[in-house]
Each structure stands twice: as structure tokens, then as C-alpha cells.
Image (cartoon, rainbow, N blue to C red):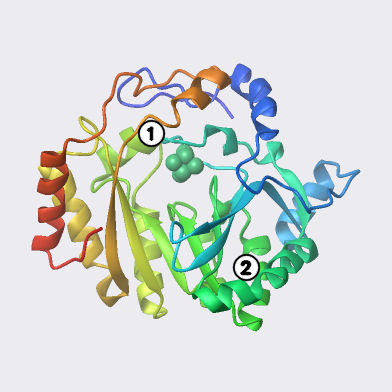
Amino acid sequence: MPSTTTAAGRFRTTTPRMLRESKTYAKQMLMGGLSGFESPIGLDRRDRIRALKTGDIGFVHSWDINTSVDGPGTRMTVFMSGCPLRCQYCQNPDTWKMRDGKPVTVEDMVKKVARYQDLFKATGGGITFSGGESMMQPAFVSRVFRAAREMGVHTCLDTSGFLNRNYTDEMIEDIDLCLLDVKSGDEETYHKVTGGMLAPTIEFGKRLDKAGKKIWVRFVLVPGLTDAEENVENVARICEEFGGAIEHIDVLGFHQLGRPKWHELGIPYPLEDCKGPSAKLRERVVKQFEAHGFKVY
Ligand code: SF4
């Protein structure tokens, strides 16, 4: 993928060096790492493309078990590899390239869900697909979701919605809850923040509402980037378009926990000197959303 530049003019999204060095990061494990998964070997490019279409295999960065972070109850969160966006505040640039992920069969992933199903049911938890961008591998994600729901396990998709068109109405049926990132409220700011387009996110939110699904909107508050009053107002108006689907909005304050990964991958980090939002700024933003009738966390 060629390098591109944001309106800020200095945010190069992909470099050959990043591609090389991201291999190092593919080995990095979160809490659950990739233990318990056998990696299918001998996959050539054609095999990978076929696997993507059928969902027989997914490319996974890592997984973990957590509580009430990525949805209700105790959850297994699976971080899929590959993302088409390049958010300036990304905490996981090591997930950007799908080819850096470990191939995992759909059967192994379903077995993993089955192993934890009693825990999920006891806590009202379930499985969450995150990333990277889980919508890059829609067939795999939806096959696991389908199997999970057949076991009575709650399903949650954490996504920007940018790849809305990858997701069929049938696939949406197997989502119980969507953690939908509304990263900004107008196309220009959205592009500056992510390198992508806002319209697909709005479209996906509307489709979820139409299908009777639940949404938790996530908005990352970055001083100097996403905090303008008008931007927040526009995000709130977009959320209104999702009707009764929205249960609440999470206002997530920017932090610098992802910075070491950017450094290690050798990617120019555009928020090097950015600080998290003050309590006063956060309060203003929360009040803006509340004024539109939303519950805010
Ligand atoms: S969508 Fe998520 S994984 Fe992709 S660049 Fe943005 S923050 Fe990172």
C-alpha cells in the first residue's frame, strides 16, 4: 500500500520499514497471546484469499479474557489483524497488516468459545471481535458469531464501520452489540484523524438500528484534534441518526500508552507531544452529549 499524507501533511500512513518491522510486533502477545491455537501451515497467497472469502481461516493478532472492557460481562476479545485506517491515536499499529497475523481455523476459534461458554453465560459476557479492523475478515467473524449464538453466547463487534459494505444484512443478524467508533463528526476532520471516510460509519450505524441491534458509541477525545465544540456536536447529531440503537456513548480520553509501539515500528507518530484531555474539557464534551439526551460514560 502506498504511503499517504493527511491534511496535517506529516502523517505517513505506511512505510516499507513499517512493513518489515511490524513482523517483530506480530510476535508480541497481549494477555492471552495466541496460546491454544494451532497455526495451519503451508498457506500461500491464493490459500489466504480463499480463506478470507470462505472464513475457513482468520488472521489473528492475539486474544485475551477481560471483564467489562469490550462489552458486558467477562469477554474473550479477539484482536484481528489488518486495518484500512491509520488513526493518529492508534494504540495498536502492530495490527495494521493482516499478513502479520497468525492464521487460525474457524474450528479452533469456535472450540475456544465453547471452552469458555459457561463463564460467558454466568457473567452475561461473550465474544468480542476487535482489531485492527474485524470487518476486514467478515466471513470468519460471522461464522464464529453464528456458532457462538447457537451456543447462547453473546456476540459483540468492535469496529469503525468503515468497511460497512463488507458486512451483509445476514451477517449483521449475528451481532448482538456493536462498539461503533465515531471518530469525528465531519468528513474533513474524520479524514484528518483516520485517513478514511466517515460516511460508511454512519451507514453502518443506521443499518444496525434498522436490524434492531444495540450500539455503544466510542468517541476518542484528543485535545487539538477531535475536541472542537462543533466536531463534538456533529458526532452527537450522527448518534441521533442511530435512533434507539444507542445504549450509551463512551468518551475515551486520549493517552500515550500506544506511543512505544509507533516508535518500535519506526512510524512517524503524529501525536508525540499531545497530552490527554483535562477534566474540564472532558466535562464539557460529556455535557454536550448529555444535552442531546445520551447517557455518557
Ligand atoms: S481503526 Fe483502530 S486499529 Fe485501525 S488505525 Fe484506527 S485505532 Fe488503529
- Where residue 22 appears, as percent x and y from the top left, is 64, 27
Queried on whether the Cβ of the residue with tag 1 lies below 8 angstroms from ligand 1, the answer reads yes
Q: Quadrant of the N terminus?
A: top right
Q: Is residue 272 left or right of residue 169?
A: left
Identify the element where label 1 is drawn. Answer: loop
Instruction: Name the amino acid, label 2.
Output: Ser
Please, is residue 96 above or below residue 106 in the view? Answer: above
Number of the label disc, if any, that sits on residue 152: none
* Residue density around tag 2, few if under 14, some if 14–19, many if 20 or more, within 10 Å: many
| In the rendered image, the vertical position of residue 22 relative to residue 184, given as above or below | above
Looking at the picture, how far across and down is residue 164, in whole percent? 47, 59
Query: Could you say where residue 81 lies in the image, as x and y percent from the top left?
Result: 62, 44
* Separation of marks 2 and 1 at Cα, in angstroms: 28 Å
Residue pointed to by mark 2: 142
Could you tell me residue 264's position as x and y percent? 56, 19
Mark 1, residues whose alpha carbon is within 10 Å: few (<14), some, or many (≥20)?
many
